[in-house]
Amino acid sequence: MTDIDICSAFDSGNIAVEAVSGAEATLKVRPDRSSEFLQWFHFRVSGAKGRTLTLKIVDLNKSAYPAGWPGYRACVSEDREYWGRADTSWEAGAGNGTLTIRHTPQSDIAWFAYFAPYSMERHHDLVADMAAQDGVEYRCLGKTLDGQPLDCLEMGEGETQVWLYARQHPGESMAEWWMEGALECLTDPGDPVGRALRKRCRLHIVPNCNPDGSRLGHLRTNSAGTNLNREWDTPTFEKSPEVLALRNAMDETGVDFAMDVHGDEAIAGVFLAGFEGIPSITDKQLSRYRRYRELLDLRTPDFQTKRGYPVASAGKANLSMSTNQLAERFGCVSMTLEMPFKDHDPLPSPEQGWSPERSAMLGRDCLATLLQWLEEGD
């Protein structure tokens, strides 16, 4: 029987083919350009209909987060609309870390990815659609190293300055699915949450902070190999023009509330990370952050507070990270939202795990929580 064909020469594609024999293949993930980060994969397999595929991705002990592979299941789609999960196993002691994906497609072509991709084409569709909505203003904050625009959508008549931004780490594609849900809420004239927020806030929304890394199939860096979320204290035009442009725009408006949207490889749950270790922290800042977290926990079972990152001790926050930098710089409440590549274990979904659909719904839940939080603070 003929060998399957494997291709990743497309937007956000990433895989290197080591060997193919029939319906079996040995593969490797390519690292981000000018960087050692590797974890994101996205490829298609053709000649696959009715055949049990065995796809072994090897050498993954070198990946950025080896702790992310136990319990992980690869995403698979045959129509690029619905993304389910494939049978997946992990062997740390085989092939210097081997992730084995097994799947029998009903179609002749199947796509596999670390998480459901959010393509640059879909990004442009989203920006065009939202920019055409009543009361929405489009602003290009600057250009990336590869010349792509850094898109920002602005709306609202209020004085409270809200910044929402996503995909500093391009492989965390669930962050832009979250953005799609949030933007649909804000622009739907029938959605009371969106209407109320636009009345009391000025919202600045950057759906994708790292278009270059997204297109190149990177996990964590831009086209120069720079981790943007370690540049917020001293961004430069040469290494991190995306952060420089975004921070300059924030300096123009000020920031009262900020959410940086991400994905986490290892923790099987949705959680928030705050700014507890910044030098200038106030009791009011900290209590308001904790209250937002409490309200989100009450609003949706797709959030939890038991798992998360260690809290920085007093004065030890890393100010090169955006959440810490903004809280210190503006005295605002800022936070990092993390969604899983695996599943939200308190409420698992066997067919899809954490999914684009859940990411989008969480976007609206976070906005509804923001509205309640603002009303409480009046």
Image (cartoon, rainbow, N blue to C red):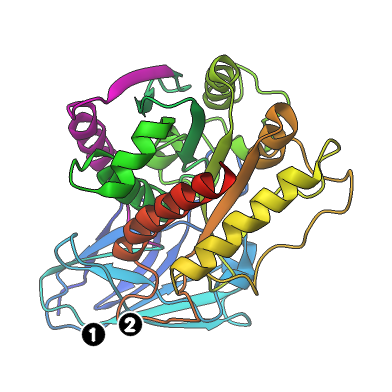
Residue 129 shown in magenta? yes
**Residue 15 in sight in this render:** no
Alpha-carbon neighbours of circle 2 within 10 Å: few (<14), some, or many (≥20)?
some
Question: Which residue corresponds to mark 2?
Answer: 102
> Which quarter of the rendered picture does the N terminus lie within?
bottom left
Label of residue 52 in the image: 1
**Is disc 2 placed on a helix, strand or loop?**
strand
The range drawn in magenta is 115-141
Q: Amino acid at mark 1?
A: Thr
Q: Residue at x 55, y 46 (%)?
A: 220
> Which quarter of the rendered picture does the C terminus lie within?
top right
Q: Are marks 1 and 2 in contact (CB under 8 Å)?
A: yes
Q: Going by the image, does 251 lie left or right of 341? A: right
Alpha-carbon neighbours of circle 1 within 10 Å: few (<14), some, or many (≥20)?
few
Q: CA distance from mark 1 to mark 2?
A: 7 Å
Residue 169 shown in magenta? no
